[in-house]
Amino acid sequence: MAEEQAPPVRRICCIGAGYVGGPTCSVIALNCPDITVHIADINAARIAAWNSDPDPVTGELVNLPVYEPGLAEVVKKCRGRNLFFTTDIEKAIEEADLVFVSVNTPTKKSGMGKGFAADLHYVEASTRLIASVSSSSKIIVEKSTVPCRTAASMRTILEANARPGLHFDILSNPEFLAEGTAVQDLQNPDRVLIGSLKTKEGELAARRLKDVYAHWVPREKVYTTGLWSSELSKLAANALLAQRISSINAMAAICEATGADVQEVAHACGLDKRIGPNFLKASVGFGGSCFQKDILNLVYLSESLNLPQVADYWKQVITMNEYSKSRFAQKVVSTLFNTITAKKVAVLGFAFKKNTGDTRESAAISLCRYFRQENAFVAIYDPKVPEAQIWLDLTEPGVVDDTKQVKEQVTIHKSVQSACKDAEAVVIATEWDEFKTLDWEAIYASMKKPAFVFDGRAIVDPKKLRQVGFKVHTVGQGPEIVDPIWA
Ligand SMILES: NC(=O)c1ccc[n+]([C@@H]2O[C@H](COP(=O)([O-])OP(=O)(O)OC[C@H]3O[C@@H](n4cnc5c(N)ncnc54)[C@H](O)[C@@H]3O)[C@@H](O)[C@H]2O)c1
Ligand SMILES: O=c1ccn([C@@H]2O[C@H](COP(=O)(O)OP(=O)(O)O[C@H]3O[C@H](CO)[C@@H](O)[C@H](O)[C@H]3O)[C@@H](O)[C@H]2O)c(=O)[nH]1
């Protein structure tokens, strides 16, 4: 029997103009000129930034709220054509035939499940708003990362509150973009996952969303599943990715103690097709808004399903990540003759990875906290993170209680050279490309001696730095092999 014709989606609303909603729906607008896209948010400042004017000299959109390579060009091309940023959420919902819910789902800070469960109140508020303002049937798409079976709660809320006669199909369409490569990932995804109910209506709604992606994604890359599998696949994918990093970081600790080199170990393992080479880069620890949050979410889900062994298994990925960060900080302190009190430590990079201005759960935040607790002076440089954001991260309520002391101990610099001047140690916390080609001789000349480099990302050549005069520690490299005088 022929499949029922799926009417094309003409108007899309995206609730949430953040790191996911903004790039995702801008790329949809770019590839689907026949679809009008409204990205709506309660945060007026964020929407104003999305609507900000180009730089009068270069014509570039330099004030967008999310920095992603290539994103400004996409927004410039589509904004005002078929892409609009608005705070009029109700109107955007009302006019749409498909609504993405792309709001934040942070870890709960209080109440039941505190520290583990996802806070779903933004998702619920969006769902209630959709129910109250809609006068036509719509497809509602979970874009946010949510616990398994959230779609069932959304359905219950919609059915209880919407006008009689309206029909809502709920789809799960988790986002797999990584920050720093968001546009590239969206333009050429490994896969697009769409989960739906296995009913005639559910499958028709999934086909309509598939048709949107088919404007630029090959149809065979769109994988359709049941709703619950789709929701769980997002948590599973992040858990598996983070697990690889914790696994290689655990190996890094063994390497440092034995003289093995974790880069060689990772390469040797990655040559096995079953293992593969990606996501095996040892580091100071993973950061970002997703890995920790989503694993905690999975741990909570497992515990609530009375699966404590499963919960413990995944919890260990986070425990190992915390250990990686503290182990690295400990290495700095022990190498600097067991005290960094009143010593200047330059921290290069504050973002959780390169090519983003995002600092959420960045390893640099933890490192700076450790160094401050040891009474060091911390000098920070990052090419993209705004100064105000760094202060916010270091003085977040509940993390430190003494803003004044933070400001006495921490300085934020506009250049690497200025951050490193008179420092005893340089710590590379983010793998920004510019750190690979620094003028290390000039940096060395300006530092106190002995001058140390602690490379938490394994991006600089330790041999070259040692020739300049530095004492170098690279994450995952045993010192007794590369520098016998440290043995
Ligand atoms: N950041 C990533 O790389 C990434 C990747 C894949 C999935 N995700 C998931 O996507 C979701 C969004 O993440 P994000 O990084 O974009 O978060 P974000 O905090 O950057 O953006 C969320 C936006 O939603 C807005 N919002 C909240 N409630 C609203 C409401 N009721 N009405 C209108 N706007 C509302 C907020 O003001 C905010 O601007 C999360 O569930 C996250 O886990 C994130
Ligand atoms: O081999 C590696 C790879 C990554 N990292 C670190 O891991 C963190 C996360 O990196 P990455 O996954 O590249 O960035 P995210 O933007 O957090 O993306 C992850 O989280 C998103 C939100 O759910 C998902 O959509 C993506 O698929 C998933 O990769 C960063 O601190 C990286 O420096 C390592 O230490 N070693």
Image (tube, helix red, strand yellow):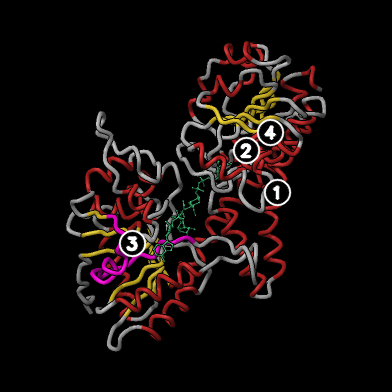
Ranked by sequence position, the earlier of labels 1 and 2 is 2
Ranked by sequence position, the earlier of labels 2 and 3 is 3
Q: Secondary structure at mark 3?
A: strand
Tell me the kind of residue under disc 4: Gly
* CA–CA distance in space, label 4 to label 1: 14 Å
* CA–CA distance in space, label 4 to label 3: 43 Å
Whether the residues at callouts 2 and 4 have beta carbons within 8 Å, the answer is yes
Q: Secondary structure at mark 1?
A: helix
The numbered disc on residue 320 is 1
Q: Is residue 33 magenta?
A: no
Q: How dense is the environment of label 1, judged by Cα within 10 Å: few (below 14), some, or many (20 and up)?
A: some
| Residue 452, quarter of picture | top right
* Percent position of residue 185, x then y: 39, 47
* CA–CA distance in space, label 1 to label 2: 12 Å
Question: Dot 2 corresponds to which residue?
Answer: 282
Q: How dense is the environment of label 4, judged by Cα within 10 Å: few (below 14), some, or many (20 and up)?
A: many
Dot in front, 4 or 1: 1
Q: Nearer the viewer, residue 235 or 420?
A: 420
Question: Dot 3 corresponds to which residue?
Answer: 14
Q: Nearer the viewer, residue 377 or 242?
A: 377
Q: Is 470 rendered above or below residue 268?
A: above
Dot in front, 3 or 1: 3
* CA–CA distance in space, label 2 to label 3: 36 Å
Q: Is 303 rendered above or below residue 446?
A: below
* CA–CA distance in space, label 2 to label 4: 7 Å
Question: Dot 4 corresponds to which residue?
Answer: 476
Asked whether mark 2 lies closer than 8 Å to ligand 2, one says yes
Dot in front, 4 or 3: 3
